[in-house]
Image: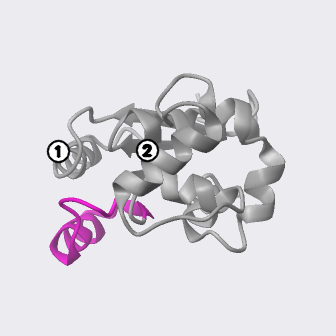
Amino acid sequence: MRRTHYTILLVCEGYAEQELARVIRDLYLPRDCGTILQPKNSRRGMPHALDMAIRLRAQREYDSYALIVDTDQHWDEAARSRAQVNDIVVIENAPCLEATLLRVDGQTSYQSTSDNKAAFENVYGGPAHRDGVIRQHFPRTKFDSARERVATIDRLLTLIRL
């Protein structure tokens, strides 16, 4: 039987990244569209997320492998190089996912992770990992309009072949 889907495994550093991946999948990849995005939460942050992606890559069950991480802790050129050598697409949130989402919405983002998390909770009424917060405040139109100015979103949408 011929396989008809292009499959992507996206290893997520944490719960907020997994929630974003689910929202993107639901907004952009309707059932039977030919592309399947499978988010998998490492639950222990970096560097465990990278190790998990490399381990799963070795099993060769998907067509493409990617990793979405924050750059604020445990992410450096050595980690980036390990991902590249293992053919893992890296999607970076600088310094964190909350900063990326604030930029998507045209809000001010900050250099410190704690300032971005506080600003995100203040603007959206809860943390990014809380079920429904990203889905409620970030419709497809926001991601579409942010694609040209937020590299993280462009890489994520490019990953799913858009």
Placement of 81 over or under 123, stated as above or below: below
* Numbered mark located on residue 10 in the image: 2
* Numbered mark located on residue 1 in the image: none
The magenta segment is 68-93
Residue 157, position in %: x, y? Answer: 64, 57
Placement of 89 over or under 27, stated as above or below: below
Callout 2 amino acid: Leu
Question: In the displayed image of the protein, which residue is found farthest to the bottom?
Answer: 77
Closer to the camera, 132 or 28?
Answer: 132
- Left or right, 66 with respect to 13, comes to right
| Residue 64 in sight from this viewpoint | no
Residue at point 50%, 25% (across, down): 130
Q: CA distance from mark 2 to mark 1?
A: 14 Å
Residue 71, position in %: x, y? Answer: 32, 64
**Eye-nearest disc, 2 or 1:** 1
Closer to the camera, 1 or 104?
Answer: 104
Callout 1 amino acid: His
Which badge, 2 or 1, is on the more N-terminal residue? 2
Confirm whether the magenta stretch covers residue 26: no
Mark 1 — residue? 48
- Left or right, 147 with respect to 84, comes to right
Residue 26, position in %: x, y? Answer: 69, 32
Residue at point 79%, 57% (across, down): 144
Describe the element under mark 2 as helix, strand or loop. strand
Quadrant location, the N terminus: top right
Placement of 14 over or under 110, stated as above or below: above
Quadrant location, the C terminus: bottom right
Residue 111 sits in quarter = bottom left
Residue 13, position in %: x, y? Answer: 32, 44
